[in-house]
Amino acid sequence: MSDTAYVFDFDGTLAVTSARVFVMVGNTVVKTLLTTEYSSYELKGDERFEYMEFRDPRFIESAQETELIHFAKFIARLNHTIYILTARDKGCLEEIKSFLHRFNLIPKEIYCVGNGDANIPEAKQQILKQIIAEHETVFFYDDDDANLELATELKCHAKDAKSILKMRHQLR
């Protein structure tokens, strides 16, 4: 069991993309959400989320880094283990690797859990359990409240990326 691991979400935590989440009723788009709006949006009635743009790797190619990517680089230089745990589809894996390599950030593993009809928070929780079993201390950074809530049920330190990024912005 190694010492400390840091687990980062991708979208809204390490990177900001223009990918949107669509709110659907049947086959009709009734609302379009930015990632910043998605985590607090509550579905109503027959609504469901559609993540088609998150399965499209082209949105990663034009992504902008957040300040947390520099924190992740700092942590990596201290020889702590870095993981990426994203709701993205596995078809985006190479583009995520490429994005991270632009910042000389090479994680031990990139987990893409957004395949099919997966329950993202539960899928992330299962991966976190595996990581926790391998490390004495685990820090988990995510911008989604449901992911953070399930992570707090585990033996890890869940950190709200939205709050950290907002605080860093205010300190400028």
Image: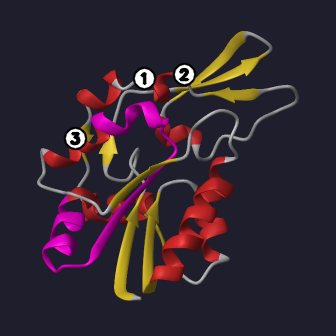
Separation of marks 2 and 1 at Cα, in angstroms: 7 Å
Residue at horizontal 16 percent and vertical 47 percent from the top: 101
Instruction: Answer with left or right where residue 87 lies relative to residue 93.
Output: right
Indicate yes or no whether the magenta region holds residue 91. Answer: yes
Of mark 3 and mark 2, the one earlier in the sequence is 2
Question: Residue type at mark 3?
Answer: Phe
Q: Please give the range of residues in magenta.
A: 70-95
Q: Are marks 2 and 1 in contact (CB under 8 Å)?
A: yes
On the question of residue 157 being in view, the answer is: no
User: Which of the 4 quarters of the picture holds residue 152?
Assistant: bottom right
Q: Nearer the viewer, residue 163 or 131?
A: 131
Q: Which mark is residue 56?
A: 1
Question: Which residue corresponds to mark 2?
Answer: 52
Indicate yes or no whether the magenta region holds residue 113. Answer: no
> What is the secondary structure assignment of the residue under circle 3?
helix
Separation of marks 3 and 1 at Cα, in angstroms: 14 Å
> What is the secondary structure assignment of the residue under circle 2?
helix
User: Which of the 4 quarters of the picture holds residue 168?
Assistant: bottom left
Q: Is residue 95 above or below residue 40?
A: above
